[in-house]
Image (cartoon, helix red, strand yellow):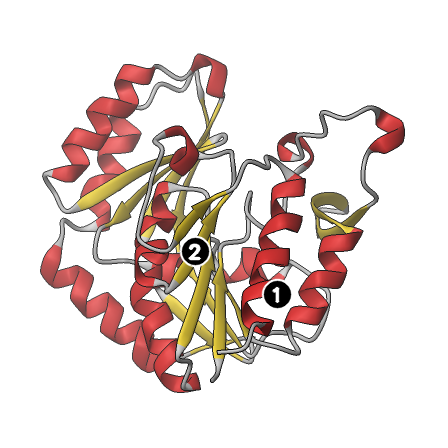
Amino acid sequence: MPVMVASDLDRTLIYSSAALALTMPDARAPRLLCVEVHESRPLSFMTETAAGLLTDLGDTAVFVPTTTRTRKQYLRINLPGPAPKYAICANGGHILVDGVSDPAWHAAVTARLAEECAPLEEVGEHLERTADPLWVRKHRIAEDFFVYLVVERELLPEEWVKELAAWAENRGWTVSLQGRKIYAVPKPLTKSAAVREVARRTGAELTLAAGDSLLDADLLLAADRGWRPGHGELADTEFTAPGLTALPERGVLAGERILREFLRVSRAPR
């Protein structure tokens, strides 16, 4: 029976230096592999053990990276093992097949967003108008699908985030705070819809998933089995779902544990 593994990347399988959570003594810290370089600087990491597990996973399942990153941001990641045939970018806005966006899927998603929620321009203008330059570092439009801000987290007013979430809710959008980024994403733009399409194409009869943020909630609800790490929005809100396991590990060791779970279940007799 074909198994598909659809996993979030950032703070689930790969980690920035700020998100590693290496709380053990330095001499006991795991060896790390850099999997992303940006502007000549190392940006994202996984443990060397996790790299081996991910390579092994390719022998037992169809691995589908499932990320909110844009295509450009995703393609600069150099994951160990064979390049995945399928990847999901822009929170489901693009299905990549051998690194190239499927035009029919992109067109269908674009049409649905136009019908079901407020336009990107309205949301982007609202963020420009209400966000304080004191704590905003970058304002980005991603793939003409959604908008996000890079902020100084310690200066970010919690009330502003709550007010933004309420404003967005009434317009068919959702808000997610992940590290130093605030995302505003149309509700119909989901990882789960894209995952279902890839499952159909691959004939997968069992879907495994993992994620740490509110943007991963629909993915975990759609999967047969799912895992979330001990950090992130889902852990903070004690998110639960049928078939979901909440792991105690935090940081880069959570990524290693998630890959062990993927391998264990994908190898089990069915």
The image quadrant of residue 265 is: bottom right
**Residue 144 appears in the rendering:** no
Q: At x 49% / y 31%, what residue is drawn? A: 179
Callout 2: SS: strand
**Residue sitting nearer the eye, 86 or 222:** 222
Residue at 81%, 40% (x, y): give it.
30
In the picture shown, does residue 5 fall above or below 178?
A: below
**Amino acid identity at mark 1:** Leu
Classify residue 186 as left or right of residue 260.
Answer: left
Give the amino acid type for the residue marked by disc 2 in the picture.
Gly
Which residue does the image show at 19% across and 60% down from the upper left? 113
Crowding near the residue tagged with mark 2, few <14, some 14–19, many ≥20 C-alpha atoms within 10 Å = many
Q: Return the residue nearer the eye: 196 or 248.
A: 248
From the image, tell me which residue sits under label 1. Answer: 263
Give the camera-side residue of 228 and 213. Answer: 228
- The spot of residue 210 in percent (x, y) is 47, 54
Q: Which circle's residue, 1 or 2, is located before the other in the chain? A: 2
Please identify the quarter of the rendering in which residue 233 is found: top left
Task: Indicate whether 142 appears above or below 247.
Answer: below
Tell me the residue that label 2 is attached to. 226
Q: 133 or 59: which is nearer to us?
A: 59
